[in-house]
Amino acid sequence: MAHFSKFLWEGSQRVGVSFSQETILESSAFIRPDGSVVLTILNRSSSEVQFEVYDPAVGFISSSAPAHALLTLAWNTL
């Protein structure tokens, strides 16, 4: 719970996430009151998973989720 409260501020709103292909990753996305975006990625598998995120405001973000990891990405859309 502490992991989420570090990144999700009071007033954050959950938004939808869509995938362009099937994935084993689980995710949730939020818009914070200042307009920045927070994306949490959960990888329950025993292998690292490469992925890309597309936000029209900033373009593509490439990253990877280590095996059995919870990863949080946060960025400004301005």
Image (spheres, helix red, strand yellow):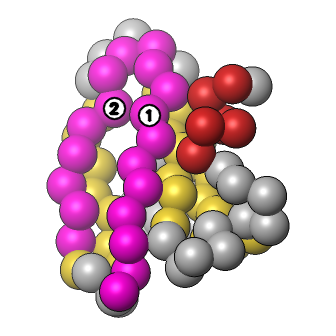
- In this rendering, does residue 16 appear at all? no
Residue at 40 percent across and 49 percent down: it is: 73
Please indicate whether residue 62 sits to the left or right of residue 17 in the image.
left
Q: Do callouts 1 and 2 mark residues in contact (Cβ within 8 Å)?
A: yes
Task: In the rendered view, tell whether residue 40 sits above or below residue 11.
Answer: above
The local secondary structure at tag 2 comes to: strand
* CA distance for labels 1 and 2: 7 Å
Q: Nearer the viewer, mark 1 or mark 2?
A: 1
Residue 39 pos. (x, y %): 51, 54
Q: Main secondary structure of the magenta part?
A: strand
Residue 71 is labelled as 1
**Position above or below: 48 against 78:** above
The residue shown at (79%, 58%) is: 10
Q: What kind of element bears circle 1?
A: strand
- Asked whether 22 or 58 is in front, the reply is 58
Q: Who is closer to the viewer here, 72 or 46? A: 72
**Residue drawn at 57 percent across, 76 percent down:** 34
Picture coordinates of residue 58, whole percent (x, y): 27, 81
Q: Position of residue 26 (x, y in %)?
A: 58, 41
Q: Which residue is mark 2?
A: 65
Q: Amino acid at mark 2?
A: Ala
Left/right of residue 45 with respect to residue 4 in the rendered view = left
Residue stretch in magenta? 60-78
Badge 1: how crowded within 10 Å, few (<14), some, or many (20+)? some
